[in-house]
Image (spheres, rainbow, N blue to C red):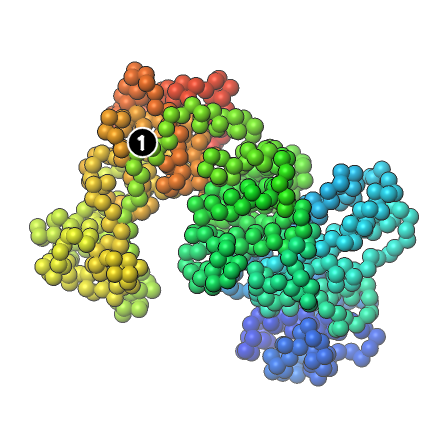
Amino acid sequence: MRSEFYLECKSFINENLQGLSFKKPEGLLWIYLQIYYYNLYPQNTPLNSKKTFLDYLDGDHHFNSYLSGFTEIPEEFYNEVHKKILSRFSFKKIGDLQEVALKEFEILFEGALQNNLRSKTGTYYTPAEIVDLMVNRGILATVKEGKQQKMLQAVLDHKSINLEEAIARKLITHLEGIKVIDIACGGGVFLREALKTITEALLTLYSLLGVRKQTVEIKELILNNIYGIDLQEDTVALCKLLLLMEINKGSTTEAKDYTLNILAADGLLTDEINQRKLEGEFDLVIGNPPYIGEKGNKRIFEEIKKTSFGDSYYESKMDYFYFFIYRGYQLLKQEGTLIYITTNYFVTADGGQKLRAFFRKHMTFRWLVNFNEVNLFKEAKGQHNLIFLAEKTKKSIEAEIIHLGDKTRKLSDIHKALNGKEVKGVVNSKVFNVDLYDERGNIVLYQEKMDFKLQKKLLSVSTKALGELCNINQGMVSGADRLSTAWGNALGLSQNIGKGIFVLKEAEVKEKALDHPLYKNFLKDFYKNSDIVRYSTKTSRGLKILYLDDEYPKDIIDYPALYNHLKEYKTLLMERREVKKGTRKWYALQWPRSKKIFEGKKLLVPQRANVNSFAYHEGPWYASADVYYITLKDESNSIFYLLGILNSSVIYYWLYHRGKKKGEYLELYSTPLKSIPICYTDDLEVIKEIERTAYQLTFGNLDQDQFQQCYHRIDQLVFELYRLEEEEIYYIKDFCNAKIKIGVLRA
C-alpha cells in the first residue's frame, strides 16, 4: 500500500510538471530539495516562494547545477507544492508534520526512473531486506578479532552481551574508523544502511559502557567514512541530499559548506575524491554493480578497453560487473571485505575464466548465497542472482554456501534463512576455498558434503571426457532467419515482417517459386531445438533452410528465383559481420558449418533444456546454433553406449552441479558438454546391454511403462559403471526425485 507522501508526490508531478523540459527524477529532486530547505530552518522565514528557494539553491554548491532547470518552473507550482507537500511532510520530526523515512524518498525516486534506463545501465533497485543483510554481514566481516566479532554479532542481533570493557572500547575504535565505499552507489541505499548500522552499534556499545550519548556524531562518519560514486548525476544528487538529510535530522547546523565524498563519475576510473586517494583505503566495498553483457553493448566495452585498467582485466564475453569486482579489490585495504550482489553466471561462464582465476589467486570467499530461480528484481525477470562476500587475502578457510532451491519463498523467509533460521527449501553447506574450484577452474557451489565426494568420484572413475571421444559442433547461423520488425521498417518492407529469408515455410517456398527441381539441393528440412527429446527427434514441421555457402552456388545469378528472393533483403544481408569483413558472400549463411555434421550419424542436444535430452539421428538434420551436434572421433566407439550414459540420471546430476545453468535450466554449451566424464568400460557385455537398451529407447516405439523400465535399467548399469555405493545411488535418486516433484524432471 502506497503512503500519502508517495501518492501526493506522484500526483503532483503527473499533473503539473509533464510539459516541462526535465524528467520525473529531476521533478522529484525539485520537490525533495524544497522539503530539505523548508524544514532545515523551521523557525526562519517560511520557504514558500520561488525566489527564496532559488536563492537557497544558488548558494548550495551540492545542487546549484539544477538552478537553470528549476528556474523555468512557474511561481504557481511553487505555491502549489508548498500547500500540498511542504506544509504536510518532513524528513525529520517537526511539530505536526508527518515524518517520511528516507528510504521512501529513494524508493519513489527509483520508481520514477525509466525502465529503459534501467535496462540500458543494468541497474536495479536492491530490496531493503537484501541491503540490510549485506550491510550487516559486510560490517561484521571487517572485524577480524574473534571476541570483537562475537560482541558485534550480538549487538547487531540485539542479543544480551557479556561485557568486556577492553573489547568494547576496541570495537568502538574500529567502528568509528571503518571506511565504506560503493562505486555504483545510485541513491546511496547501501551507504545509508551502513551509516545506520554503525551508528546504532556505537550507541549500544556506549550505553553498555555507561557513557551517556543520545546520538553519535553522524556528520563526522558521513564526512570521513562514507564514500560513493555513480555515473548518473540525478542519482548522485539524490544520494547527497539524503545524506545531508541524515546529518540534519538531529541538527540545525547549516550543511551547505560540508564536502561530501560522493561523486558523479565513473567508479571504475576514479582515483580520488576531494583530493583523497582511494586505492587501498577501504575496509568495506559494497554494492549492486550494473549487469551489462557484452552482446549488444559493444560500445561500452570498447570504451573501457581503451584504458589501462580495462585493457588489463577485459576478457571476451564477460559481464561489465566483473570490472567492478577488480576495482573493488584495488580499493580494499589488505584483508578488506568485498560484498556484492550480482548474477550467478560468472561461476561457470566461459567469459568468466579470467575472473575466477583472479579470485582463486588473490581472494578468499567467506560467504556465498545462490538465489537460483528466486526473483529478487521484479524488473529483471529470469535473472539469477548471487551474493558473495570475499576478503582481500588468501586463507585456507571454509566458505559458507547457501542455496535457495524454492523459488516461491518470500523475501522475508529468505531473510530468516540467511540469518541462520531453518526454512524449507534452503540448504547450507561449508566447503574449503581450495575445493570451491573444479578441474576447469569453475566455481562449484556445493550443496552438501556428499556432492563434493560424489563429483570427485565420478571424475576419478571416468576414463575420458566426452570431448576426447567426440567432436562437438554448434549448428548453423544464418544471420537472418526471418525479417525482423526493425529491418522491415528500415527497408520499407513492413508487409514482409515475419516472413522467411533463409528459413521458409512450405507455402513461402512455393510463393517464391523455390519448389522447382533446380533448387532442390539448396532446401533442407529445418528443425528447432524443441524437436529434440530424450533418445529421439520429432518429425519435420515443414520448415526449410536455404543452405547456401561460399562454394555452392558459385554464382547466385544462375538461380533466378533464389536471387530474386534474396536480393530484396540484400541491404540487410550485407550488414552481417562476416559479409562486412569480406569473408562471406552476401547471399551465403553467416556460419554454414560443414555439411557432414548435419548429414551422418550423430547425437543431438538442445543448447538449453531442463533435463539432459540427447537424441540419436542418422541422415540430414539441419538446425541453428541452439543445437549441438556430437559425432564420434573414432567409429570403433559405440554411439548408442554414449547415448545411454548421456541420458542417465548420473549425467543429469553431473550437469546440474558441474555444468552451466540458468536457474533450473541446463545450459548445454560446448565447454560443459566436452567436460562430461565418461566411463568407457572394457566389459563388452555391459557395453552391449547399454547399446541394446538405448537402441530400444530410440526406435522401439515403447509405451510409457516400457520406456521407464528401459530408462531405469540403463540408470542401474551406469551406477555400476561409475562404481557408486548404495548411499551414493540413493543420493542421486533422491536428487532426481526432488526435481520430479517440482516439475523439472519427468517421472
Image position of 583 (left or right of 324): left
> Whole-percent x and y of residue 485?
32, 63
> Whole-percent x and y of residue 151?
79, 41
Image position of 327 (left or right of 180): left
Total number of numbered discs in the rendering: 1
Identify the residue under disc 1.
469
Quadrant housing residue 586: bottom left
Q: Is residue 380 above or below residue 443?
A: below
Image position of 624 (left or right of 747): left
Q: Quadrant of the C terminus?
A: top left
Q: Which residue shows up at 23% across the image and 41% down it?
A: 598
Q: Which residue shows up at 91% across the image and 48% down it?
A: 210
Q: Is residue 10 above or below residue 141?
A: below
Residue 446 visible? The answer is yes
The amino acid sitting under disc 1 is Leu
Q: Which residue shows up at 75% across the image and 70% down it?
A: 258
> Whole-percent x and y of residue 181?
66, 57
> Whole-percent x and y of residue 499?
25, 58
Q: Which residue shows up at 51% across the image and 19% down it?
A: 727
- Residue toward you, 400 or 385: 400
Q: Quadrant of the N terminus?
A: bottom right
Residue 428 visible? The answer is no
Image position of 340 (left or right of 593): right
Classify mark 1: residues with Cα within 10 Å, few (<14), some (14-19) or many (20+).
Answer: some
- Residue toward you, 522 or 73: 522
- Residue toward you, 109 or 689: 689
Q: Element under label 1?
A: helix
Quadrant housing residue 216: bottom right
